[in-house]
Amino acid sequence: MASDDIALLADALSKTHVGDGELSFKGLGLKLDDAQSVEELVRDIEQFQGLRALRLEGNTVGVEAAQAIAKALENKDQLQRCYWSDMFTGRLRSEIPTALRSLGSALMTAGARLTELDLSDNAFGPDGVKGVEQLLKSPSCHSLKELRLNNCGVGIGGGKILAEALIDCHRKSLAHGSPLRLRVFVAGRNRLENEGASALAKAFQLMGSLEEVHMPQNGINHAGVMALASAMRHNPDLRVLNLNDNTFTKRGTIAMAQALRHLRNVQVINFGDCLVRSEGAIALAAVLREGLPVLKEINLSFGEITEAAALVVAQTVRDKPDMEKVDLNGNCLGEEGCDALREAMEKGDMLGSLSDDEGEPEDEDDDQDDHENEEEEEEEDEDASDDCNEDEDGEILKENGTTKKDDSPEKPQSSAEIMSFLSCPSAEKLLQLGETRTNVQQQVHASDPHTAAETLLKISSLYSEEPETKTAVLETIDAVLKKLLSGSDLSSYCFLSTLLVMMGLLKGEGKVKKVPLVPGQLLCLEHAVQQEYFPQHVASLLHTFTSRNSEALESCSSASERLSSTLEKKCH
């Protein structure tokens, strides 16, 4: 090394930070190629007594230099925190795993017990994960609390290797009586996709100790989101969940909503740019209403959420005592919708900017959206529901004290008459059922919102002012709705969003299509809204959609006016 280079290195090293057991070479821009180039750095490490944290980020380290640094670390048994992000700029990708293995081997030799490991912004790919695989499996990581691998190009393969390493670490640490309790996991911009995310979800569920999860921009769609949602349920101390810029759609959002119902400590949710859409937003609104007691921030920006759904979210968050920020920017509200949202958010400083609003959605895009929805659905099981997966939403009901349909003690000794009526409803058949007509409710379940909404609309279409028929229809509607609205808010809102799609009041995903409306359907709803079993917050949701999509009810103008008036009274 030339004397000038040595002088420059000496000057750089003179700027190192020392304190609190930390030795920092952060951001010095050193190009460390070989053993000679790191002589003074190595000397500083060797002479540092009680080394607990080593910062090497913002330099570039070659294989020989890494081996020399590793040698200096072999007796640093008190080292706990390794900040090694952005450490291989300009290096061949093939060099990085070798360098990482050397450093990891030194930590294991020293018997260090790490609490933090940051390898972010090192574009090492799956091979880089292999470079730290043995370290992650070793006793040196049994104590790990924070693992940061942001922007490393980990990929699907690397995600699987990482997941297996964490699972192995947990298994071994558990056998030693002190299981791995990782608190912070950061792995954004890594192209994990569904397979990588699903593999990591297994590790997350096993550990059950996570407090922060940051996995933005990973190309994860609903299948991977559903796997992560299932895992999050088993992490009761979760405070921050950032999955920004993945693709939830309705299925993923409902699964995540189901998981969030179980979590009482969440403070920050970032589902921005996740294609949550309106049905997903309604599901999240239900969870906001009945759970998440200490939530401070929620980001649902750029999610193709329409005005009415955004207002439902606003109505549920404004009474949250700790809420500080709601981001609904970049959705499909339109100018009037933005104004309505600002008005609905009484705490004006809570609502973020709406400057990037996409404007009201265009109806002519329906065919294109349907095609996109079909592509999003293609990975689903053939027997899956078009709306909410029966197992997931059945589980929602069971956990709220109402048994899901497969276990229901109410499961009917299905009469031929009821089944005949439901297959081809008519006023005559309904009257023939007599008092047993209320048993129709045994055939509907909030766990299958599509069938429930379809059944409700079929029965209500039989409404007439003939007294006997009117009484029979309204009694049956009361029995059905009383059951559907008696579970959790989430199950009720999933049913309602499907009903709204069928009524043409909400643009939905998948194969749920709008049905031709008749006045009797609206008059049955108008009757139901006045009953005690019909909650005010459900009436408010219905009012929000009917008042902002009145053109969908134009064919039933008189009945629509009656429903609107009754909803107005119920809500105020």
Image (cartoon, rainbow, N blue to C red):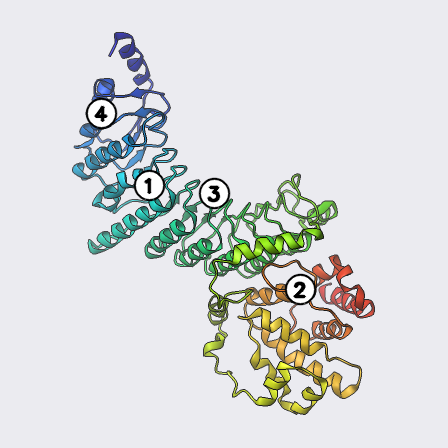
446 with respect to 506 (left or right): left
Camera-near label (4 vs 1) is 1
- Sequence-wise first label, 1 or 2: 1
Q: Does label 3 or label 4 sit earlier along the sequence? A: 4
Real-space CA distance between mark 3 and mark 2, rounded to the nearest whole angstrom: 32 Å
Q: Position of residue 9 (x, y in %)?
A: 29, 15
Residue 204 percent across, percent down from the top left: 36, 53
Find residue 126 and name its label: 1
Q: Is residue 481 left or right of residue 248?
A: right
- At label 4, which amino acid type do we have? Glu
Helix, strand or loop at disc 2? helix
For marks 1 and 3 on the same chain, the one whose residue lies earlier in the sequence: 1
Within 10 Å of disc 2 (Cα), the crowding (few <14, some 14-19, many 20+) is many
Q: Nearer the viewer, residue 510 or 17?
A: 510
Query: Would you place residue 55 above or below residue 11 in this image?
Result: below
Q: Quadrant of residue 452?
A: bottom right
Say what amino acid the circle numbered 3 marks: Gln
Q: CA distance from mark 4 to mark 2?
A: 65 Å
Foreground: disc 1 or disc 2: 1
Can you identify the residue that label 2 sits on? Answer: 500
Q: Can residue 561 be seen here? A: no
Report the residue marked by disc 4.
64
Identity, as a three-letter code, of the amino acid under mark 1:
Pro
